[in-house]
Image: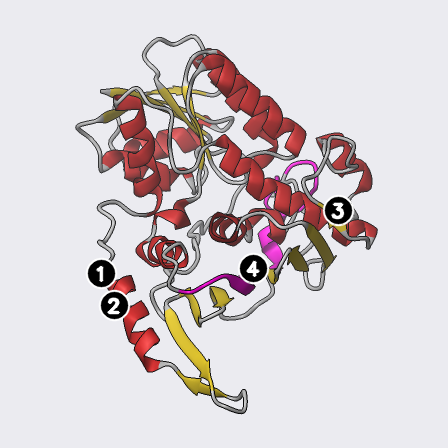
Amino acid sequence: MIRVAVIGTGKISESHLRAYASFGQRCHITALSDIYPDKCTQLKEKFELDCDIESDYKKLLDRTDIDLVSICTPPYMHAEIAIAFLKAGKHVLVEKPMASSLEECDRMLEASEQSGKILSIISQNRFRDPTMRLKKVLDSGLLGKVVHAQVDSYWWRGHVYYDLWWRGTWEKEGGGCTLNHAVHHIDMFQWMMGMPNRIQAVMSNTSHDNAEVEDLSVAILSYPNALAQITSSVVHHGQEQQLIFQTEKARVSAPWKVFASISRENGFPVRNEALEAELDAYYTAIPELEHTEHAGQINDVLTAIENGRTDILVDGREGRKTLELITAIYQAGTTGQAVTLPLQPDSPFYTTQGILSHAPRFYEKKNSVVGFEQNEITLGSDYKQA
């Protein structure tokens, strides 16, 4: 039985608790911790948990009845808490984004390596059937090389969204939509496409004058023989979200859609329906995942712990890659200059202090509320509808 503590009991922690509950024969929630203990009490009652409640997570560090910790706090606390529990000999699962800076990521990775414990970063969209299948289609060799990718991370958030006490500042949220919303799609993208050589970007705050951070960014990524574009937004009505890959032989995407062309004698296209049928058949033949989303990733981590392994789909190094892309977007969008990857420690955006010193403040954060009475959230597309 793997014994689990959950640190931070905001709304996203419920996704973790539901996932753990689905593996009740394999794990048990031992403790909940939050600076607002009444939130822990509410979750304890809602999920009918037999667990302790602590307002100070540090009181859990030396507990011998904790094997795995889920960290669901605001991003600025991720590194501090993760490093402390790794050094205390616990496995750690951290909500996205991994940390506030690459320097913090590197310290988290060092703590994981020294302790020999698992460090996993939540990337629940990798554990969806449409995205897992798309990844396998791209890796199949049926498409040829990718020549262009399009990432539409379209979300919509009302003005009051940034009134929550930790949102809307570089210090506590670490950034705006690029870091905290598009992180899902940027993670899927880099998993499928790999890391670029260079990034150019622009960003703005168009609609939220109660936040320092951006609510819209557009980035162009350069590869040796391909280009990609990433739009990160919380101002798009309808919240359409998709990843599109144009390859040598066909266009494929999540949500799944395929279109293939071949050349006429004069160079103009004609539809390649035979290849489309082959790709559709390959896609639909891929078995469905037994567990999806948070449950899929938590199952991956639990299985590794049970078998004494550390190889998981989304480890700390994968989480760092995603944050490196986001950091490069911020650096390029702030300086107006192209950024070459990999980023080096002398980057002005490598450390948290460097980000705080250089990042633009579009507006002053004006309001601060502890929470909202109506607290339902949305976690994005299921990528099933084209």
Q: Which residue is mark 3?
A: 331
Q: Find residue 157 and name its label.
A: 4
CA–CA distance in space, label 2 to label 4: 38 Å
Q: Quadrant of the N terminus?
A: top left
- Callout 4, which amino acid? Arg
Residue at the front extreme of this rendering:
265
Assign a secondary structure to mark 4. loop
Secondary-structure class at tag 2: helix
Give the alpha-carbon distance from disc 2 to disc 3, as whole Å.
Answer: 42 Å
Lateral position of residue 124 relative to residue 339, left or right: left
| x and y, in percent, of residue 127 in the image | 35, 47
The amino acid type, in three-letter code, at marker 3 is Gln
Name the side, left or right, on which 141 lies relative to 218.
Answer: left
Q: Residue at x 73, y 46 (%)?
A: 340
Tell me the magenta residue range.
143-172
The amino acid pointed to by label 1 is: Ala
Residue at 41% x, 77% y is: 260
* Image location of residue 279, percent across then percent down: 32, 68
Foreground mark, 2 or 3, reads 2
Q: Position of residue 203 (x, y in %)?
A: 72, 58
Dot 2: few (<14), some (14–19), or many (≥20) neighbours within 10 Å?
few
Q: In this orientation, does residue 183 appear? A: yes
Q: Please tell me which residue lies in front, 4 or 11.
A: 4
Q: Residues within 10 Å of mark 3 (few under 14, many from 20)?
A: many
Q: Identify residue for label 2.
A: 281
Contact between marks 1 and 2 (CB within 8 A): the answer is yes
Of the image marks 3 and 1, the number of the one nearer the N terminus: 1
Q: Determine contact: label 4, label 3, CB under 8 Å.
A: no
**Residue corresponding to mark 1:** 285
N-terminal of the pair, mark 2 or mark 3, is 2
**Cα–Cα span, label 1 and label 2:** 6 Å
